[in-house]
Image: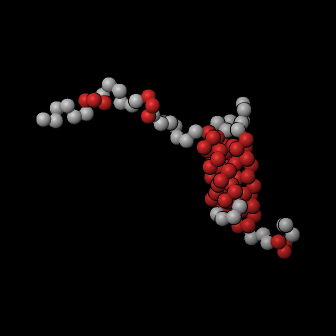
Amino acid sequence: MMASFGHGTRRHPRSRGRTWSRTGPDRATLGIIGVICAVAGFFVLGIILGPAAIVCGWLAMGRGWAGPRPATAVVALVLGAIDTLLALIWLAGATPGYGVF
């Protein structure tokens, strides 16, 4: 009775119009996610969102410095680095009264 179950998809397992990216999100999406993480990291959980923004920016740049770089990727990378640095200074116990700011 169930002899034909599953045979319809053997020749064409994925149709052309419905295939998704096999490597994850595209570079533009990673850049936007990185910028959002970096901006949110200035307000909450900078020690977590800062490195996440750096990773998203680096992946959005194509894991290299050569070639054209999207602006959102560079912004995510730079803001993530600043965010991480500020979070590390804050965790080290620096307060405005001791001359750091």
**Is residue 53 toward the left or the right of residue 1 in the image?**
right
Task: Give the camera-side residue of 75 and 82.
Answer: 75
- Percent across and percent down for residue 72 are 70, 44
- Percent across and percent down for residue 64 are 68, 36
Q: Residue at x 12, y 35 (%)?
A: 1
Dividing the picture into quadrants, the one containing residue 2 is top left
Task: Give the camera-side residue of 21 and 15.
Answer: 15
Counting the numbered discs, the total is 0
**The residue positioned farthest toward the left in the image shown:** 1
Residue 42 visible to the viewer: yes
**The residue positioned farthest toward the front in the image shown:** 17
Q: Quadrant of the C terminus?
A: bottom right
Residue 51 visible to the viewer: no
Q: Is residue 57 above or below residue 67?
A: below
Q: Residue at x 45, y 31 (%)?
A: 17
- Percent across and percent down for residue 36 are 65, 53
**Is residue 4 toward the left or the right of residue 22 in the image?**
left
Q: Residue at x 73, y 47 (%)?
A: 75
